[in-house]
Amino acid sequence: MKVLITGATGMIGCYVGKLLHQSGHDLVVISRRSPNDTQMHVPFPCDVITADLGQSPIRNSLLEEVEYIINLTGESIVGSLWTPSYKRRLEASRVVTTRNLFQSFALLSKRNLKGYIGASAIGFYGNSFQEQDEQAEASDGFLSQLVQKWEDSHMLFKDLLPQQRVAVLRLGVVLGYPGGIHERVIPLLKMGLGSVLGSGKQWMSWVDLRDVGRFVLWLLERTSPWSPIYNVTSPNPVTHCQWLEQLTQSVRGRMIPFNTPSWFLKAILREQSELLLGSQRVLPQRALAEGFRFHYERLEQSLAFLNELFAQTTHLFWAEQFLPKKKEEVFPFFQNAKNLEQITPDFLHFKILKQSTALIQEGTEFHYTITLFGIPLKWKTLILDWDPPHRFSDLQVQGPYKRWYHQHIFNEVPGGVIMNDRVFYELPLEPVGHIGYPWVRQTINKIFQFRRRKIFELFADDHTPVDLGKMRQKGL
């Protein structure tokens, strides 16, 4: 199938796109970024249409080939305080972009469109301690009104697809990593700053990111009609306190011994405090009735993978990048330590001093210097887990961090390889060192953004956007 994704660079879009690609589907992405920049930020190959749907409909011949649309566009509701201007941005990023997407397809003289899936949210139902399914009424708060307008814009596609192939997914709190609520909360728990918000008795309807991807794929592959609305939430919602306690245990974190009072959150966040204090006990009745089964029904099943990731570290940086090469072509580049200088930003003044073997292998030690936060430092690294062309890791023996362990994993997928970097690190002088965490995190992001760009330039064919047809001809 030819599937169009909007919002492809977000947490859900990246995962859904990766899953669809690995299931054999061809992908088209609409992004405000350039084609090269977009392909550096999504872990799958795709054709890219550079456009801003927030401004106007688009005209592009690729739209004529699209069979299914997965519309995930929308600014984060926690990206800023809900000022009047930000509320307008939230609405425009959902409603205006979806209307312009509809117009883009309505204007086509030739269409191959067979189905449309639009993202929505359980904010539709408002604050309630009662169980709610798809038959429940909408609330009247800002978030519910925003969702209602969003869903109305999705339903415009019924004019193009009258055979019950338009579905809106009311998503619960999506639990995954990296990204989402985990990426915000886990560092606080690891620093011992986690706190139950309000009474902690408010219900939290959650869903595992992997089940979101499975649900989208399940819909696309169904031949029977779709329902217009699906709650995509675990069948087993939990209270806020239950979620936070289980998450704390999974990542081996700590909480402060008192709750953050509701009045304080309301005073600081005002209307936006409903995101933290509101209760939603939403059930996925239609999905279950039509035969979908959640793999991660219970919270402990969803959180299990975090236990392994955070068992021996305080902080984790995670990045994925698709390259249109076989891993046997990519891995040798990392076997030469001098090549690391090419993919390290100039502000670090990275320089290899010596290494114990000519080529990197298990047990290789190498010494280098860097400048970190304006301070010249010596760094000594030991290579571990050397398994070409699949993976290797390096461990800081001497350097500025209390711990730095970097895994490089190369996973072959149709059309190329996904290169996964996982950096497990701890800051010096913890817990006092946690003060510098935002600065350190920003610096690591900056380093890996540079690294991502340089690696893409080195391995993308002729430094041009990935050509899917060319890749298939090569047998990738």
Image (tube, rainbow, N blue to C red):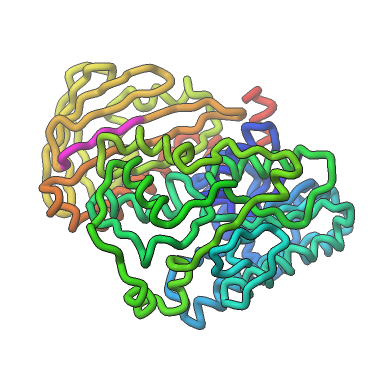
Task: Name the residue nearer the viewer: 186 or 10.
Answer: 186
Q: Position of residue 376 (x, y in %)?
A: 11, 46
In the image, residue 304 lies at what x, y percent? 42, 36
Q: Nearer the viewer, residue 155 or 366?
A: 155
Is residue 322 covered in magenta? no
Q: Report whether 95 appears left or right of 280.
A: right
The residue at the point 70 percent across, 66 percent down is 151
Magenta span dominant secondary structure: strand
Count the numbered circles shown. Answer: 0
* Residue occupying the far bottom of the picture: 84
Q: Is residue 65 left or right of residue 121?
A: right
* Nearer to us in this view, 248 or 237: 237
Q: Answer left or right for 457 relative to 107.
A: left
- The quarter of the picture where residue 17 lies is top right
In this view, 200 is above or below 83:
above
Please determine whether, in this image, residue 104 is positioned above or below residue 448: below
Q: Residue at x 19, y 53 (%)?
A: 434
* Quadrant position of the N terminus in the picture: top right
**What percent of the width, then of the height, locates residue 15?**
55, 43
In terms of image quadrants, where is residue 250?
top left
The foreground one among 178 and 249 is 249
Q: Residue at x 76, y 53 (%)?
A: 116
Residue 2 appears anywhere in the view: no
Residue extent of the magenta highlight:
401-407
Quarter holding the C terminus is top right
- Where residue 245 appears, as percent x and y from the top left, is 35, 49
Q: Is residue 369 visible?
A: yes
Q: Does residue 28 lie above or below 364 as drawn?
A: below
For the point 14% across and 48% down, the residue is 430
